[in-house]
Amino acid sequence: MDKNKFVTWAGKDRFKNNKKEFTANVVMVVIAVLCMGISLGFLLETDLGTDPYTFMNVSIAGKIGWTLGNWQFALNAVMFIIVILITGIGLIGPGSVANMILVGYTVDFTRSVIGRTFSEGFFMGPVARPVTFILGLVGFLISAAVYMNSRLGLSPYDGVGKIICDAFKKIPFFITRIVFDSCAVVIGFVFGARPRIGTILMAVFLGPAITAVGKFMDRYIFNKSEK
């Protein structure tokens, strides 16, 4: 076994160099992950589609009678172990743990609050539905871009996706990722969910969109291009 795989974790260098800045980045990532969960909660209320991984997990959780939070945490834990066994801890960091635990439970909490606050079917209205979907999608893209560009570790799902993409290096990354996300949609469909237009679009464009938003933030917010 290559022991070097278990020496460096995502963000370790920044932790050593500047613990105050590292702590601020971790707080930012946790906020971004919570915002992802809140955005997904509203997206699910519109029933116009969500990201492939959430679509799959909502479908499976509904089929087996689990909450999304419990099922997603269990699946994340399995993938978390797979990523560590294959790649070591180089892809793992505080962001990985935050994503693994918080997203699903935040979605459950958000939908619970929505259910107690708004009348049933409110977000299915002719105005509320498209507006909520657009705002939820934008919120998800921005928070996901902040999370991924923090470089504090990949989520278990993204970690498995990276392993698969690295195994097919001759194929462009975005194509492999689209196929990977599409498989999640197919699994969700097999478990009884119907993919909406938003899910199909996200399976194709989510990766490139997050990359584009991330590059914009790197250049105009984090100024990483100048360092």
Image (cartoon, rainbow, N blue to C red):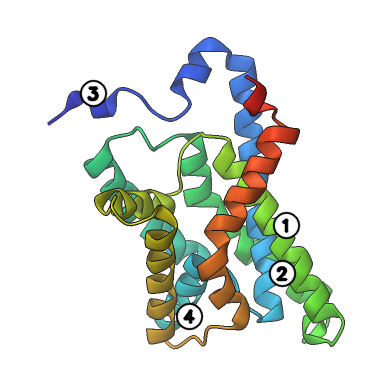
Sooner in the amino-acid sequence: mark 3 or mark 1: 3
Task: Identify the residue position indicated by label 1 in the image.
Answer: 139
Sooner in the amino-acid sequence: mark 2 or mark 3: 3
Q: For the residue labelled by badge 1, is the local secondary structure a helix, a strand or a loop? A: helix
Task: Identify the residue position indicated by label 2 in the image.
Answer: 42
| Contact flag, marks 1 and 4 (Cβ < 8 Å) | no
Q: Nearer the viewer, residue 19 or 49?
A: 49
Relative to residue 183, is residue 46 drawn left or right? right
Q: Of the numbered discs in the image, which one, if any, rests on residue 34?
A: none
Give the foreground label among 2 and 3.
Answer: 3
Relative to residue 67, is residue 144 drawn left or right? right
Q: Is residue 33 visible?
A: no
Give the foreground label among 4 and 3.
Answer: 3
Q: CA distance from mark 3 to mark 1?
A: 38 Å
Q: Position of residue 65 (x, y in %)?
A: 44, 79
Task: Identify the residue position indicated by label 3 in the image.
Answer: 4
Q: CA distance from mark 2 to mark 4?
A: 18 Å
Q: Please tell me which residue is depicted at 46% across the width and 18% down the height of the picture.
A: 13
The N terminus sits in image quarter: top left
Sooner in the amino-acid sequence: mark 2 or mark 4: 2
Q: Position of residue 135 (x, y in %)?
A: 78, 65
Sooner in the amino-acid sequence: mark 1 or mark 4: 4
Residue 222 lies, with reference to residue 175, above or below; the image says above
Q: Please tell me which residue is depicted at 44% across the width and 65% down the height of the picture.
A: 178
Q: Please tell me which residue is depicted at 63% across the width and 27% down the height of the picture.
A: 225
Q: CA distance from mark 4 to mark 3?
A: 41 Å
Q: Residues within 10 Å of mark 2 (few under 14, many from 20)?
A: many
The C terminus sits in image quarter: top right
